Image: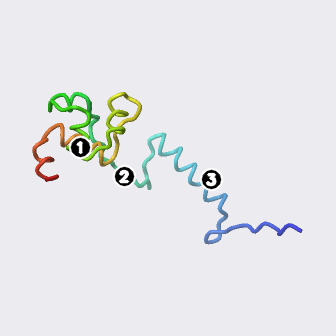
Amino acid sequence: MAKPKKRVRLAGRSVGSEIIEGLKNAIAFANGDIRGARVHRVYTPAPVDVTSVRHKLSMSQGEFAAQFGISPATLRNWEQGRRQPEGPALVLLNIIAREPEAVRRALR
């Protein structure tokens, strides 16, 4: 015999009404109404042309990968466009592009 389903309540309100209110708030935000909204700005580093950076340093894929602690397979995937660097890897590549000696010093 199946158990009867319990209705979940949050401080006197049903989960369904909470979801509906959240959806209404999302629609209002999408339409430009930011009253009461928590807005978080996230910094996203600039994209990096990994092949250009590597060529600028006159390094082979193997040398570049070994020097900067990147998997050779990952480097190939970035250079061939199968994957895009993101997160900490993208930050590291931006620093390598601008200050490769600083990264080399830090990694010694």
The residue carrying mark 1 is 66
Looking at numbered disc 2 in the image, what kind of residue is underneath it? Answer: His
Q: In the displayed structure, does residue 60 sit left or right of residue 28?
A: left
Residue at the bottom extreme, as displayed:
11
User: Residue at image x 37%, y 33%?
Assistant: 77
Residue at horizontal 12%, vertical 41%?
Answer: 99
What percent of the width, then of the height, locates residue 15? 65, 62
Label 1: how many residues lie within 10 Å, few (<14), some (14-19) or many (20+)?
Answer: few
Question: Do the residues under discs 2 and 3 have CB atoms within 8 angstroms?
Answer: no
Q: Earlier in the sequence, mark 2 or mark 3?
A: 3
Percent position of residue 90, x then y: 29, 42
**Mark 2 residue element:** loop
Q: Nearer the viewer, residue 76 or 88?
A: 76
Q: Distance between the residues labelled 1 and 3?
A: 52 Å
Q: In this image, 90 relative to 11: left or right? A: left
Category of crowding for the residue at label 2, using alpha-carbon neighbours closer than 10 angstroms: few (below 14), some (14–19), many (at least 20): few
Residue marked by disc 3 = 20
- Which residue is drawn at the image coordinates 13% and 41% (left, top)? 100
Numbered disc total: 3
Q: What is the C-alpha distance between the residues marked 1 and 2? A: 36 Å
The residue labelled by disc 2 is 40
Residue 108 left/right relative to 72 = left
Q: Which of marks 1 and 3 is in front?
A: 1
Q: In which quarter of the image is residue 92?
A: top left
Q: Residue 53's x, y, as percent?
A: 20, 32
Q: Note whether 39 is above or below 86 in the view shown.
A: below
Residue 93 x/y as whole percent: 24, 40
| Residue closest to the far front | 62
Q: Which residue occupies the foreground of this view, 35 or 108?
A: 108
Q: Earlier in the sequence, mark 1 or mark 2?
A: 2
